Amino acid sequence: MASGWGITGNKGRCYDFWMDFSECMSHCREPKDCSLLREDYLECLHHSKESIRRWRKPEPLNQSIRASNQMASGWGITGNKGRCYDFWMDFSECMSHCREPKDCSLLREDYLECLHHSKEFQRRNRVYKEEQRKLRAASRKGEQAVDGTTH
């Protein structure tokens, strides 16, 4: 929707891209300074680059990398490659050549882990809980030892 809010009442899927582009346009000297942000916003709205990539023949790897480096998507906020871009490219390459999506499940898992860190957080939580369990056990053992000596 034009207001930036989606049909469900939450932020629209392209609202963040619009805000970045809008902020750039209000602070820049020339519109071309914000061309990459505009490309990102329009890609979010129309998926034109994604559609072209989906329907054309796969290119040799070195050409597809060169083409993707010219695109605004895949680049981080500082202008360098995004932190998960390499994982995405591996997954995307696999999906464009595989017979079944399940063939690329490990690459998809790696990409999603890079984005969300869910396995990392689960592991951290398990380690934290184990440390807390050990501390509680040690404190109970210490209390029992103190109680045993005073009787």
Image (tube, helix red, strand yellow):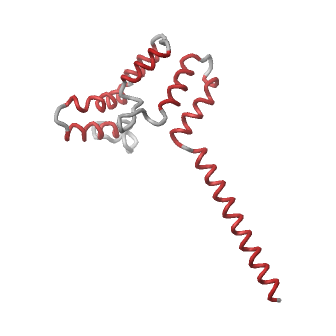
- Locate residue 81, reporting x and y percent: 42, 32
Q: Does 34 sit above or below residue 70?
A: below
**Farthest bottom residue in view:** 151
Q: How many marks?
A: 0
- Locate residue 147, reporting x and y percent: 78, 84
Q: Quadrant of residue 23?
A: top left
Locate the C terminus and report the quarter of the image it occupies. Answer: bottom right
- Locate residue 12, reporting x and y percent: 37, 39
Foreground pick, 76 / 49: 76
Q: Quadrant of residue 109?
A: top right
Question: Is 80 on the left or on the right of 115, as rendered?
Answer: left
Residue at 52% x, 42% y is: 116
Question: Is 8 on the left or on the right of 88, as rendered?
Answer: left
Locate the N terminus and report the quarter of the image it occupies. Answer: top left
- Locate residue 129, reporting x and y percent: 66, 59
Residue at 37% x, 30% y is: 44
Residue at 51% x, 39% y is: 115
Q: Does 11 sit above or below residue 74?
A: below
Q: Does 21 sit above or below residue 104?
A: below
Question: Is 41 on the left or on the right of 115, as rendered?
Answer: left
